[in-house]
Image: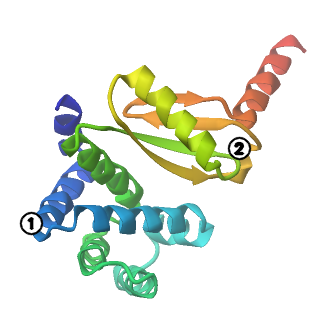
Amino acid sequence: MASQTKSADTLAGRYAAALFELAEERGELDAVAEDLKRLRSMIDGSADLQRMIRSPVIARRDQARAIAALAAKAELSEVVQHFVGVLARNRRLFALPDMIQAYLELLAGERGEVAARVVSAKKLSERQLKSLVESLRAAMGSAVTVDASVDASLLGGLVVRVGSRMVDSSLKTKLQQLRLAMKGIG
């Protein structure tokens, strides 16, 4: 409950809570969650889309048109299309990834689950995903919902984020740490 209160105090938390309430009223909690996950995958997979939602230089009207076209092309639900339209009009698209995460955390909290975000260098197999869920469940002591995505720049390993805790066992991070350690020696 404390994490829900903390989340509701942020910009992303307030927008996510409003979207959650609307989706709950319409009985579309899961459909909205799936649309948001697809939207996040699109954002994560496109540097151009990331720039578009974060750029203060792009006119509000152009951002609204671009995100509306993307949402329609991806056949996102009416609720999600309206939501991203409101974000564009209010110049809040930059916070969309955080809003998506906050929504998924609210949904997991509603179900008595803990939401975990897992990023791997390559797509996890069903067996690997099941093993990861079991390990997280044992560590957290409650049901866990895993949202897995791929980031090839990690080179290997995983980055697991549960609430405010993060475990980064990626090869990319280990190489960066080694590089810093080697600078200290020389």
Amino acid tagged 1: Glu
Residue indicated by mark 2: 154
Placement of the C terminus among the 4 image quadrants = top right
C-alpha gap between disc 2 and disc 1? 39 Å
- Residue 135 drawn above or below residue 29: above
Q: Residue 60 is drawn in which quadrant?
A: bottom left
- Residue 22 drawn above or below residue 9: below
> Residue 34's spot in the image, x, y percent?
38, 64
Residue at the image position 70 percent from the left and 32 percent from the top: 173
Residue indicated by mark 1: 25
Q: Residues within 10 Å of mark 1 (few under 14, many from 20)?
A: few
Residue at the image position 53 percent from the left and 71 percent from the top: 49
Circle 1 SS class:
helix
Amino acid tagged 2: Leu
Residue at the image position 37 percent from the left and 84 percent from the top: 68
Q: How many marks?
A: 2
Extreme residue toward the left, this view: 25
Circle 2 SS class:
helix
> Residue 156's spot in the image, x, y percent?
75, 40
Extreme residue toward the right, this view: 186
Residue at the image position 74 percent from the left and 24 percent from the top: 177
Q: Residue 137 is drawn in which quadrant?
A: top left
* Viewer-nearest of discs 2 and 1: 1
Compare residues 17 and 28 and report the one nearer the observer. Answer: 28
Label for residue 49? none
Compare residues 82 and 29 and report the one nearer the observer. Answer: 29
Compare residues 87 and 118 and report the one nearer the observer. Answer: 118
